[in-house]
Image: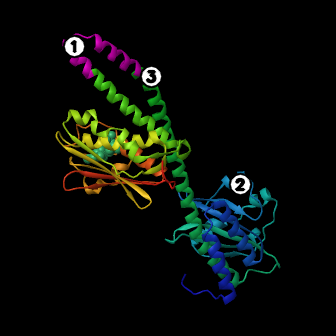
Amino acid sequence: MTQLPNIDAAGLARMVQISRVLNSTTELSTLLNQIIREAATLTRTEAASILLLDPNTRQLHFKASSNNIPPQMANMPVSLDDSIAGAILKADEPMIIPDVTQDPRWNKDVDKAINFQTKAILGVPMRNVDQEPVGVIEAINKLDGAGFTPQDVETLTILADIAGVAVEKARLIEELQQANAELSELDQLKTDFIAIASHELRTPLSVILGYVSFLREEASPAMMDQFDSVLQAAVHLRSLIQDMLNLRYVDAGVTALDLEVVDLGRLVRDLALDEDETAVAKAQTITVTVPDEPLPIRVDKPMIEVIISNLLSNAIKFTPQNGRVDITLRRQGSEVWFTMIDNGIGIPKDQLDRIFKRFYQVESPLRRHHEGMGLGLSIAKELVELHNGRIWAETLTEGSKFTMVLPLHATAGI
Ligand code: ADP
């Protein structure tokens, strides 16, 4: 805009109000209808319409009009080269056509399709924040039959400036929403696939496990090692499948939780974490420190066990032979803090948040030989959050520390 518009205080206040309304509308068709309503009211005209520029085809399309536009017309392109709207957009300035019947660019089909008679048009271009063309607003036929005034031109130009930015924003939001919907659909497909695959894999795996255990009992000492390897691999496969099944549980959300009040201290003691077979095999020392006072929490018990088991299996996995894992429980105000410290290979500081994302694994030569799918911590985090808790990881001078915080249940004595 090169010149300041000649607008009085009341007009300015009206424009500010319109700007507020248009900028708070993010649904494109609602927004377009608001714009044409304002355009017709401000210019005191019979009707108004909006044509938007398709950025790909560089053609205009009728998108809204005070006279209902038949759907087939909304899809009909309006050429930039031989239409009044096209001329306004290309000239990039307002245009008054006092008598459309005298203008060769006038297309009578539009009037016929909507059963309307256009006499005069005031059209102004709409631009986005970067001053690129977005479309055209047309005000049609002054109500009093008189001609369009410079005041009409100014008012519609200001409206077009506000509208252009709002339309662009609404279009971007629609594109984002569409992209988001496509992503959610993909995510759902992935979740469904995981659910079906894990479910289908479980049955043949139980058969394998059953027969291998049986055959191992009958095996000659010479064959024992081979059967042990098969059994170990099958058990590992079972834990991977269990992770996938847990994922489905997490996706079901809070409604899937079967809540009961338990004492976290007792739950942890009952798990006998210090006797973990894998840790024993690696000659690792696991200590568990639980206070004497009760620590009541209202949780889905098997899910809390899944969280603790995921944390412990990581601590054992990423800690070498003869290492240590120290587990501590303590009350902190109205919360219970569960910490697990290992003296293993540690986690790079810049990955501390990412390890809680699904399928994320820290890439490093040290870790490459560790098995897993990168699901354990994401499941743990989602489950903790379903219980209104928090979980995070820290890097220590040697090893890692995981902290899970859960709200204490407000009833005394269990
Ligand atoms: P998985 O263990 O199946 O790879 P997780 O989601 O449980 O998947 O863990 C994600 C990643 O976080 C692991 O691959 C590992 O790189 C890192 N990590 C988790 N726990 C520890 C730990 N105690 N010490 C070192 N790294 C860890």
Q: Type of residue at label 3?
A: Thr
**Predominant secondary structure, magenta span:** helix
If the picture is divided into quarters, which one holds ligand 1? top left
Q: Type of residue at label 2?
A: Met
Q: Is there a contact, CB below 8 Å, between mark 2 and mark 3?
A: no
Please, what secondary structure does the residue beneath circle 3 have? helix
Which mark's residue is nearer the viewer, 2 or 3? 3
Please, what secondary structure does the residue beneath circle 1 have? helix
User: How dense is the environment of label 2, judged by Cα within 10 Å: few (below 14), some, or many (20 and up)?
Assistant: some
Q: Is residue 361 above or below residue 81?
A: above
| Residue that numbered label 1 is attached to | 223
Horizontal side of residue 136 vs 281, given as left or right: right
User: Would you say residue 402 is visible in this rendering?
Assistant: yes
| Residue that numbered label 2 is attached to | 73
Residue in view at x 22 percent, y 13 percent: 223
Q: Position of residue 265 (x, y in %)?
A: 38, 47
Magenta-drawn stretch contains 34: no
**Bounds of the magenta span?**
206-229
Q: Position of residue 338 (x, y in %)?
A: 35, 51
Report how far apart the C-alphas of labels 1 and 3 lie in the structure.
Answer: 26 Å
User: How dense is the environment of label 1, judged by Cα within 10 Å: few (below 14), some, or many (20 and up)?
Assistant: few
Q: Is residue 242 above or below residue 97?
A: above
| Residue that numbered label 3 is attached to | 203
Q: Which mark is residue 159?
A: none
Q: Is residue 345 above or below residue 54?
A: above
Q: Position of residue 332 (x, y in %)?
A: 39, 60
